[in-house]
């Protein structure tokens, strides 16, 4: 007879080191805070706003130096406010370098 899991209890899974983890501990089940007044930009719009080439944005993302871009299913996206903040930070750094 198959045991039925109680939906009110977290599922436990075995990790490779033998410890048990709750499915509630996984990043996929972590709640995401909604960003009011902000929108997700597809990769093409990130390129338009920054005026950088696709290769430049991908290289900056690889190095961890560009705007915070993340994968949403199979698409690269970024919060509009993160892209604008990154551009403003680049402008501040340029002003400091010239001073």
Image: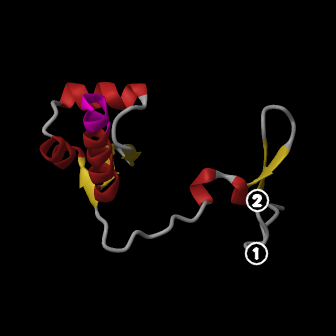
**Residue drawn at x 87%, y 36% as measured from the top left:** 18
For the residue pair 47 and 8, the one nearer the viewer reads as: 47
The region drawn magenta spans 93-99
Q: Percent position (x, y) of residue 49?
A: 16, 47
Q: Quadrant of the N terminus?
A: bottom right
Q: Quadrant of the C terminus?
A: top left
Q: Which residue is mark 1?
A: 8
Q: Residue furthest front?
A: 99
Distance CA(mark 2)–CA(mark 1): 9 Å
Q: Percent position (x, y) of residue 77?
A: 31, 48
User: In screen coordinates, is 87 left or right of 36?
Assistant: left
Position of residue 94 relative to residue 39, above or below, is above
Q: Secondary structure at mark 1?
A: loop
Callouts 2 and 1 close, C-beta under 8 Å: no
Q: Percent position (x, y) of residue 33?
A: 50, 68
User: In screen coordinates, is 19 left or right of 55?
Assistant: right
Question: Is residue 4 found inside the magenta-colored segment of the image?
Answer: no
Position of residue 17 relative to residue 69, above or below, is above
**Residue drawn at x 36%, y 32% as measured from the top left:** 61
Q: Which residue is mark 2?
A: 11
Q: Percent position (x, y) of residue 69?
A: 36, 43
Neighbourhood count class around disc 2 (C-alpha, 10 Å): few under 14, some 14–19, many 20 upward: few
For the residue pair 75 and 53, the one nearer the viewer reads as: 53
**Residue drawn at x 86%, y 41% as measured from the top left:** 19
For the residue pair 58 and 6, the one nearer the viewer reads as: 58
């Amino acid at each position: 007879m198959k045991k039925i899991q109680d939906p009110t209890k977290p599922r436990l899974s075995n990790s490779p080191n033998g410890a048990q983890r709750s499915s509630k501990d996984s990043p996929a089940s972590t709640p995401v805070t909604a960003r009011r007044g902000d929108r997700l930009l597809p990769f093409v719009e990130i390129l338009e706003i920054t005026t950088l080439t696709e290769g430049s944005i991908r290289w900056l993302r690889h190095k961890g130096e560009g705007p915070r871009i993340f994968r949403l299913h199979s698409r690269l996206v970024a919060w509009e406010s993160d892209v604008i903040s990154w551009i403003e930070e680049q402008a501040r750094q340029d002003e400091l370098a010239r001073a």
